[in-house]
Image (cartoon, helix red, strand yellow):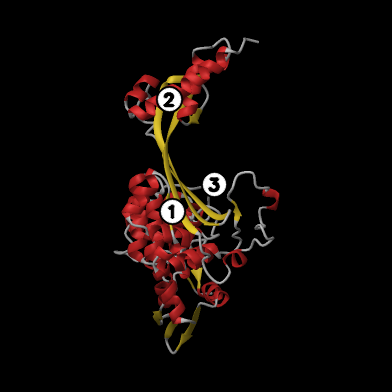
Amino acid sequence: QVTTPLGPLALDILPNINNIENFRRVGPETKAVVLAPTRTDPLAIATSDVVLGLAEAEHVNAAVLPPDDCEDWCYRVGRSGKVSLAALAQEAAYSKELELAEEKGWLVGAPTDPLETTWERLSRPALEELLNAIESTRTVPIDALARFEMQAGPDSNKVLASTSTMALHNWTFYDLLPNGDLGAEPCLALLGTLNDDQRQRAAQGTLKVDPTQLSKEQVAYLHDWLLAYGQKFMPKAPGVDFAEAWKTLDGRGEPTEVLGSGLPAGSYLELIDRTKLDFTIKRTQDSYGCDLDGLAQLSAKAERPELFPTIVDYHLDSIWAGTERNLVMRFVVGNRSEDQAFSERHSPNRRTPGQTIPEILDQLSPDVRITYTRALEKYRSEFARKKPR
């Protein structure tokens, strides 16, 4: 049986592919290559090693135009560090994407549908921008995901994005998306098309856009999102019986029924973008996370240790401040809506010394300090009515 080994870069990545429990950092050379797919194509990491190695082992030439999925096949059938021609040909045949065979001294691989292979091929510049945004911010920026989906296209094959994120971060691309693939990709692409003015208005309050103001591209993304498998229009108004959430007022609830032959009059796209403070507090055994209101509550509890004896476990002189951004895209028809929520957390640097509450407050805006003070007085008043047990 003809086999060929994976190359050194692929062997460095291999242990991290679909192996959550035993993740370890790849070497600096491997990392640099993964972060630069416009300089070294991802298919040149495992796929090229396998194709050229098999051709050399068979003493034939090679002419193969692989789909992006081929990189995943090579890792899948090369778990031992070697790939056999028979195993690779079996993966190709099973996928119905690539016809792989030996012909007259050549190892030939041709896409079964060249147009589809070209259409689904992932944009390398878009992938490079996303990977480096994650690397530089140490989080997954919502705007970077949105720009990626807009540039690459929601229908593009994301397998190379997944092998890259598994290599570097121990999660697949689809782990980044809420609700898996239920409309999140076209929704993100739609978000990526919004201009700076619209984003600022969303951050300042709530952005509402009439569908007639959307471009053809935006309407296409909107339809793809709303009609994605598993999507439902849910009650938007408070007090609606959520046990009947799948129904509209007239008993219909599927997106195709709610939308009818187009986007109904009076419907609108809504964007709500909020960023809030997120605190990490050292405890005796571990750490504790809370928002601004939670911080005020802990501060009020610290003033009444006779009521809350466990407050001594909280080290209120060791607090780190971060932020959490929550963004909701919503399409509203009457009193029903389809929603997609995205979150982005910027964790504080725990390597720096923690701060006290007064030190934290000194860095906040006057409006935020006022909000904190009001919450503190609320809890002081509440605790004043309590008696020790």
What crowding class fits label 1: few (fewer than 14 Cα within 10 Å), some (14-19), or many (20 or more)? some
Distance between mark 3 and mark 2 Cα atoms = 41 Å
- Residue closest to the eye, 65 or 305: 305
Q: Residues under labels 1 and 2: Cα distance?
A: 30 Å
Instruction: Give the residue pinned by disc 2.
Output: 372
Which of marks 2 and 3 precedes in the sequence?
3
Quadrant of residue 194 within the rendered picture? bottom left
Which dot marks residue 208? Answer: 1
Task: Work out whether mark 3 precedes mark 1 in sequence or the reverse, and give the earlier one.
Answer: 3
Q: Are marks 3 and 2 in contact (CB under 8 Å)?
A: no
Amino acid type assigned to the residue bearing label 1 in the image: Lys
Q: In the rendering, at what x and y percent does residue 13 appear?
A: 43, 56
Q: Residue at x 44, y 83 (%)?
A: 108
> In the structure shown, which secondary structural element does the residue marked by tag 1 occupy?
strand
Residue 166: give x, y in percent of width and height: 46, 54
Mark 1 vs mark 2, foreground winner is 1
In this rendered view, identify the residue nearer to me: 132 or 23: 132
Going by the picture, which residue comes out furthest to the front?
Answer: 266
For the N terminus, give its image quadrant: bottom right
Amino acid type of the residue that numbered disc 3 sits on in the rendered structure = Glu
Q: Is residue 362 left or right of residue 71?
A: left
Q: Identify the mark at residue 21; answer none if there is no mark.
A: 3
Q: Is residue 347 visible?
A: no
